[in-house]
Amino acid sequence: MGILWFILIFITLTGHGDAHGPDSCNHEGGLCRVGNCISGEYLARYCFEPIILCCKSLSPTTAKS
């Protein structure tokens, strides 16, 4: 019975609201974090709303040639 609750919660989180998933977050330069973004990052969107956040750096990184 416990596994059914886990599956139900997972399906609910993946299909909820503005959740785009970790692939979308990583592709756009963000990192998925549980709870809060760390210092120097801001909430860009949700990986799995409302628990797992997609955080991006405040200062854009530049590639050196």
Image (spheres, rainbow, N blue to C red):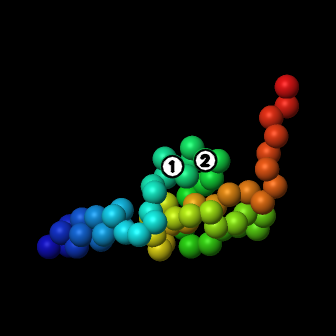
User: SS of the residue at dot 1?
Assistant: helix
Q: Residue furthest top?
A: 65
**Residue positioned 78% across, 60% down in the render:** 58
Residue at horizontal 14%, vertical 73%?
1
Q: Amino acid at mark 1?
A: Ser
The answer to which of 46 and 39 lies nearer the viewer is: 46
Left/right placement of residue 42 relative to residue 6 reads: right
Residue ID at (63%, 53%): 30
For residue 4, say whether it is visible. yes
Residue holding disc 2: 28
Image-quadrant location for residue 49:
bottom left
Q: Position of residue 61 (x, y in %)?
A: 79, 45
Tag 1 residue:
24
Q: Residue furthest left?
A: 1
Q: In the rendered structure, are the residues bearing label 2 and label 1 in contact, judged by CB atoms less than 8 Å apart? A: yes
| Residue found 85% across the figure and 25% down from its top | 65
Q: Position of residue 8 (x, y in %)?
A: 24, 69
Residue at disc 2, secondary structure = loop
